[in-house]
Image (tube, grey):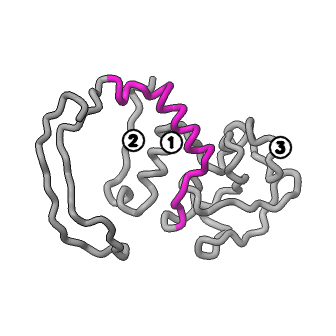
């Protein structure tokens, strides 16, 4: 039942850059790129609509959890059932590559998440009036911050209480 779906995770995992996005991907209907519950996806993509993660623009993946990577580069020589060498994408958020490697969803993954949002998960916004209650703003337009560093800047927090479009 979609209304009873939720995400539970350890707080420390939500700040590593990709695990929260990975779990949100599941919430919005995505499977792991190495999924085998509906069959092993072939490297040549011939069964991509009925096996693996069921998404054709994610390459077949042997499961990057514990092996096959040098940094964020796939170096293993694993083959699929047809004997073709895997060339998985360690940058895909739904892979099991280390969290520092995972940074993107594919176009078809975005389409899948949008489909789930517009069909199975419409309750997320069905009760919302879409008008802001609060506004947070800053004069800073662009800032580059190395990972793990703190920043300080002024914010303006306004109670808008809007119930009509501006």
Circle 3 Cα neighbour tier, 10 Å, few/some/many (<14 / 14–19 / ≥20) = few
The quadrant of the picture occupied by the N terminus is: top left
Magenta-span inclusion, residue 102: yes
Residue under the point 35% across and 73% down: 144
Quarter of the view holding residue 17: bottom left
Front of the two marks 1 and 3: 3
Q: Are marks 2 and 1 in contact (CB under 8 Å)?
A: yes
Question: Which badge, 3 or 2, is on the more N-terminal residue?
Answer: 2
Residue under the point 17% across and 33% down: 162
Q: Secondary structure at mark 1?
A: helix
Question: Which badge, 2 or 1, is on the more N-terminal residue?
Answer: 2
Circle 2 Cα neighbour tier, 10 Å, few/some/many (<14 / 14–19 / ≥20) = few
Residue under the point 21% across and 60% down: 138
Residue stretch in magenta: 101-126
* 102 horizontally vs 53: left or right: left
The quadrant of the picture occupied by the C terminus is: top left
- Circle on res. 46: 3
Quarter of the view holding residue 126: top left
Magenta-span inclusion, residue 36: no
Q: Nearer the viewer, residue 92 or 163?
A: 163
Quarter of the view holding residue 129: top left
Query: Which SS type dominates the magenta stretch?
Result: helix
For label 2, the residue is 7
Counting the numbered discs, the total is 3
Measured in 3D between alpha carbons, the distance from the residue under mark 2 to the one under mark 1, in whole angstroms, is 9 Å
Question: Which badge, 1 or 3, is on the more N-terminal residue?
Answer: 1
Name the spot of residue 99 as percent of width and height, x first.
49, 63
Q: Are marks 3 and 2 in contact (CB under 8 Å)?
A: no
Measured in 3D between alpha carbons, the distance from the residue under mark 3 to the one under mark 2, in whole angstroms, is 33 Å
For label 1, the residue is 26
Q: Secondary structure at mark 3?
A: loop
């Amino acid at each position: 039942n979609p209304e009873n779906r939720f995400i539970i995770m350890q707080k420390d995992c939500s700040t590593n850059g990709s695990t929260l996005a990975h779990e949100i991907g599941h919430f919005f209907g995505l499977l792991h790129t190495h999924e085998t519950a509906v069959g092993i996806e072939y490297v040549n993509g011939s069964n991509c609509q009925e096996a693996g993660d069921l998404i054709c623009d994610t390459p077949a993946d042997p499961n990057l959890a514990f092996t096959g990577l040098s940094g964020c580069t796939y170096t293993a020589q694993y083959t699929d059932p047809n004997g073709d060498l895997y060339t998985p994408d360690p940058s895909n958020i739904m892979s099991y590559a280390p969290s520092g490697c995972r940074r993107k969803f594919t176009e078809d993954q975005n389409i899948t998440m949008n489909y789930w949002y517009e069909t199975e998960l419409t309750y997320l916004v069905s009760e919302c009036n879409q008008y802001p209650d609060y506004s947070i703003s800053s004069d800073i337009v662009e800032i580059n911050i190395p990972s793990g560093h703190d920043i300080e800047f002024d914010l303006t927090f306004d109670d808008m209480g809007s119930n009509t479009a501006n």
